[in-house]
């Protein structure tokens, strides 16, 4: 049928007087050189880099906001060694600090007044300030941004993606694509190999992969955090403490069933492969200022859901702990009387509830996000009201509320769930702990990582008659020997897709990913991927065949850090 007849036929359908409601035609496809799918922190960086290189770019985001976790509650950002961060990522953090009249010394590890490691790593920022800066960056670069665009299909011609089709019918066509989603949604729809399982230690000769149990009941402490009055209390604050807790409804009676918050299942053999991704949570921004909103309990709140928390409290008190809020949350100060609340032993994490997320529909993801919110609201309400909670904890949590000037469209609650791990691509290069621990060097580095292996628990399960947090590892939050992230970890196998780069769901083992997964590192990988996409267009080659010397030269010219130790240069 000739094209004009198709158009006439469609017009007739939409204008028919038959009584059927007229249906608007879908808009014409959006054309670009590079399509970046995922408007989280790295997506913004990638899109800005493409624009700076003179290529037309579209930034397509399934949600309503840009910035992901960096603008979604992660106000105290961990970086590792700041000397590993360069390019647009360094520029972003420098600009954020400047909002608060601060200057970051990028040539040495960050520290806070009075000594000790910097709280939050590099800086502390209010979420709305971070989001405003991301929005400003795309405006300044004249990036076309499309929000509320949920990916339905990725069409391919052989090994090349040709267009993306959204659930609402919108289409985006490009010659190069970059997946900057936490979950690897574009990668998966493009038919690229990936995994959702924790590899066994034997697969890559690793130590911390697969089923993992930490040393039994070794309490871990952190340096005391300043309280809401700004003063640092004396002593050590225990915020990540393991104790032998009875998991059964009737203590000592397995036939009575498991408590809420404890998962059923075989504890398995350490080191064996196993399913499951890290626990998710919300990173709350709370305030003690007068502009705070109350933290309301969830619908159908039931304090019995938190009996395991009550047993944790009783066990700590039996040991003589002088409990305060830091036993349930690691909270770091932000500007203007706000605080970034991170999770602790029985904090915001909800092990097991995250497993379904990476492959779930957008509708189901919204339900899972609500499940996490309801759990977290219920926990905070329990800590604020239950007589089983020490008065000091109740008094302290009742001083906090949701800031009116943060996340106004969601009532002060963050709009972004902390997706600590989703799909992970399996490509010709898989980053492993041999790379992240510095035992091997990844070929063709396009950025550096430097954070310790920090894996949040996968399961809260019964082993030897008590509750264990299975899958948790922590090899040192202070950092790790800086290591290169290889270009091969960003590109699929060529036979699977030759015009796609993946920057968050990159090719890494579970345990290596637990080090790489910091937001600043993914911002770095995203800029490098954008640079590679533009250069591959220039050369007319698949991304796998791009000249690495040419890529390296451009990355260095743009200020990316590729080598360790770094070359000497003036601090910015």
Image (cartoon, rainbow, N blue to C red):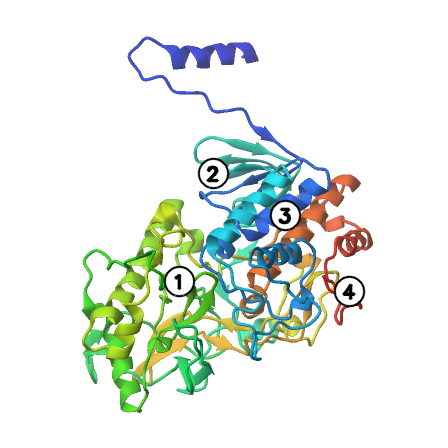
**Alpha carbon of mark 3 to alpha carbon of mark 1: how far?**
26 Å
Q: Is residue 148 left or right of residue 30?
A: left
Do callouts 3 and 2 mark residues in contact (Cβ within 8 Å)? no
Q: Earlier in the sequence, mark 3 or mark 4?
A: 3
Q: Earlier in the sequence, mark 3 or mark 2?
A: 3
Q: Position of residue 98 (x, y in %)?
A: 60, 57
Q: Foreground mark, 4 or 1? A: 4
Q: Earlier in the sequence, mark 1 or mark 2?
A: 2
Q: Is residue 498 visible?
A: no
Residue wearing tag 4: 570
Tell me the element at label 3: helix
Residue wearing tag 1: 281
Looking at the image, residue 422 lies above or below residue 156: below
Tell me the element at label 2: loop
Do callouts 2 and 4 mark residues in contact (Cβ within 8 Å)? no
What number is the disc on residue 149?
2
Q: Position of residue 321 (x, y in %)?
A: 32, 87
Quarter of the image for residue 264 reads bottom left
Q: Residues within 10 Å of mark 3 (few under 14, many from 20)?
A: many
């Amino acid at each position: 049928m000739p094209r004009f007849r198709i158009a006439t036929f469609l017009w007739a359908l939409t204008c028919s007087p038959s009584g059927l409601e007229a249906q608007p035609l879908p808009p014409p496809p959006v054309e670009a050189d590079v399509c970046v799918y995922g408007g989280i922190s790295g997506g913004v960086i990638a899109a800005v880099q493409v624009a700076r290189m003179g290529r037309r770019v579209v930034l397509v985001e399934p949600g309503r906001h840009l910035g992901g976790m960096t603008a979604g509650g992660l106000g105290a950002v961990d970086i590792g060694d700041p000397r590993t961060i360069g390019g647009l990522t360094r520029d972003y953090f420098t600009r954020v600090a400047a909002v608060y009249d601060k200057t970051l010394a990028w040539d040495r590890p960050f520290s806070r007044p009075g000594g000790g490691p910097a709280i939050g790593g590099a800086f502390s920022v209010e979420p709305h300030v971070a989001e405003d800066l991301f929005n400003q960056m795309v405006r300044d670069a004249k990036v076309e941004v499309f929000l509320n665009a949920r990916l339905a299909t990725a069409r391919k011609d052989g090994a090349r993606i040709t267009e993306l089709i959204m659930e609402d019918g919108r289409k985006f066509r490009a010659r190069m694509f970059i997946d900057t989603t936490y979950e690897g949604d574009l990668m998966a729809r493009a038919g690229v190999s990936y995994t959702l399982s924790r590899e066994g230690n034997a697969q890559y000769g690793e130590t911390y992969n697969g089923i993992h149990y930490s040393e039994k009941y070794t309490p871990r402490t952190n340096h005391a955090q300043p309280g809401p009055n700004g003063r640092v209390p004396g002593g050590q604050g225990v915020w990540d403490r393991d104790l032998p807790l009875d998991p059964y409804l009737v203590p000592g009676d397995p036939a009575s069933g498991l408590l809420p918050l404890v998962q059923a299942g075989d504890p398995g053999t350490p080191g064996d492969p196993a399913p499951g991704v890290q626990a998710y949570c919300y990173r709350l921004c709370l305030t003690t200022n007068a502009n705070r909103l109350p933290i309301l309990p969830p619908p159908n709140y039931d304090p019995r859901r938190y009996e395991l928390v009550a047993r944790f409290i009783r066990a700590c008190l039996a040991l003589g702990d002088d409990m305060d809020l830091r036993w349930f949350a690691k909270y770091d100060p932000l500007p203007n009387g706000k605080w970034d609340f991170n999770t602790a032993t029985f904090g915001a994490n909800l092990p097991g509830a995250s497993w379904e997320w990476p492959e779930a529909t957008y509708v189901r993801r919204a339900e899972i996000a609500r499940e996490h919110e309801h759990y977290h609201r219920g926990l905070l309400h329990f800590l604020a009201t239950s007589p089983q909670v020490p008065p000091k904890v109740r008094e302290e949590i009742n001083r906090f509320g949701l800031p009116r000037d943060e996340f106004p469209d969601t009532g002060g609650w963050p709009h972004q769930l902390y997706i600590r791990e989703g799909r992970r691509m399996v490509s010709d290069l898989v980053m492993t702990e041999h790379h992240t621990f510095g035992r091997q060097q990844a070929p063709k580095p396009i950025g550096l990582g430097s954070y310790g292996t920090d894996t949040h628990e996968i399961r809260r399960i019964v082993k030897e008659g008590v509750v264990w947090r299975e899958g948790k590892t922590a090899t040192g939050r202070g950092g790790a020997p800086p290591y290169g992230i290889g270009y091969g970890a960003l590109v699929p196998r060529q036979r699977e897709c030759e015009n796609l780069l993946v920057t968050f769901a990159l090719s890494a083992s579970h345990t290596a990913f637990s080090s790489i997964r910091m937001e600043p590192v993914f911002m770095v990988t995203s800029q490098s991927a954008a640079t590679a996409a533009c250069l591959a267009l220039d050369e007319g080659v698949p991304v796998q065949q791009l000249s690495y010397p040419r890529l390296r030269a451009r990355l260095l010219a743009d200020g990316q850090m590729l080598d360790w130790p770094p070359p000497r240069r003036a601090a910015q």
